[in-house]
């Protein structure tokens, strides 16, 4: 992708950072949302957003569109960890 779009290593760093920052910023709100509406619904949102933005990454045409896509990807995927661990406590017995 880097070669195809003609991006430098620094620009790829922006792309990777966009995902990481969005994921970090939206992790707590994603966990809160799971407490409000339940982990199953949030995990369904996470899987839907992950699927959509996997495809949307291929639609990016320049650095800006790729950074925005990866940021939204991270925001959509955030909340997976706290909701997955909460779901495990409901779905699996303690034994």
Image: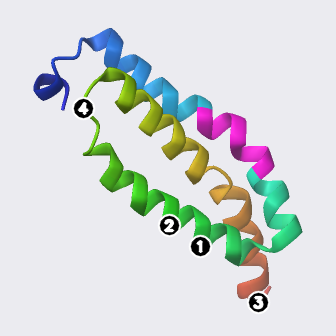
Find the distance from the CA under tag 4 to the CA under tag 2: 22 Å
- Against 38, residue 81 (above or below) is above
Any magenta on residue 27? yes
Instruction: Tell me if 30 is positioned left or right of 78 in this view.
Output: right
Location of residue 93 (image quadrant): bottom right
Q: Marks 4 and 2: CB-CB under 8 Å? A: no
First along the sequence among labels 3 and 4: 4
Cβ atoms under marks 3 and 4 closer than 8 Å: no
Where is residue 15 shown, x and y percent of the image?
40, 26
Secondary structure of residue under mark 4: loop
Query: Mark 2 and mark 1: span between their CA atoms?
Result: 6 Å
User: Reading the chain from its start, which is encountered first: label 2 or label 3?
Assistant: 2
| Disc number lying in front (4 or 2) | 4
Where is residue 48 shown, x and y percent of the image? 50, 66
For label 3, the crowd category at 10 Å Cα-Cα, with few meaning under 14, some 14 to 19 and many 20 or more, is few
Q: CA distance from mark 4 to mark 1?
A: 28 Å
Spatial distance from mark 3 to mark 4, Cα to Cα?
48 Å
In this rendering, is residue 40 above or below 16? Answer: below
Badge 1 crowding class, 10 Å Cα cut-off, few under 14, some 14 to 19, many 20 or more, is few
Q: Which residue is mark 4?
A: 61
Residue for point 46% across, 32% down: 68
Q: Are marks 2 and 3 in contact (CB under 8 Å)?
A: no
Q: Residue at x 68, y 67 (%)?
A: 42
Range of the magenta residues? 22-29
Residue highlighted by disc 1: 44
Q: Which residue is mark 2?
A: 48
Q: Is mark 2 in CB contact (under 8 Å) with mark 1? A: yes
Between marks 4 and 1 in the image, the one whose residue lies nearer the viewer:
4
Query: Badge 3 is on which residue?
Result: 93
Q: CA distance from mark 2 to mark 3?
A: 27 Å
- Please name whichever residue, 65 or 28, is drawn nearer the observer in this view of the structure: 65
Chain-order first, disc 3 or disc 1: 1
């Amino acid at each position: 992708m880097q070669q195809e779009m003609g991006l430098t290593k620094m620009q790829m760093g922006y792309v990777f950072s966009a995902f990481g920052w969005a994921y970090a910023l939206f992790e707590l709100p994603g966990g809160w949302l799971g407490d409000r509406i339940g982990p199953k619904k949030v995990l369904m949102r996470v899987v839907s957003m992950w699927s959509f933005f996997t495809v949307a990454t291929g639609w990016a045409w320049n650095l800006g569109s790729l950074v925005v896509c990866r940021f939204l990807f991270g925001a959509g995927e955030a909340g997976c960890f706290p909701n997955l661990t909460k779901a495990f406590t409901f779905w699996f017995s303690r034994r």
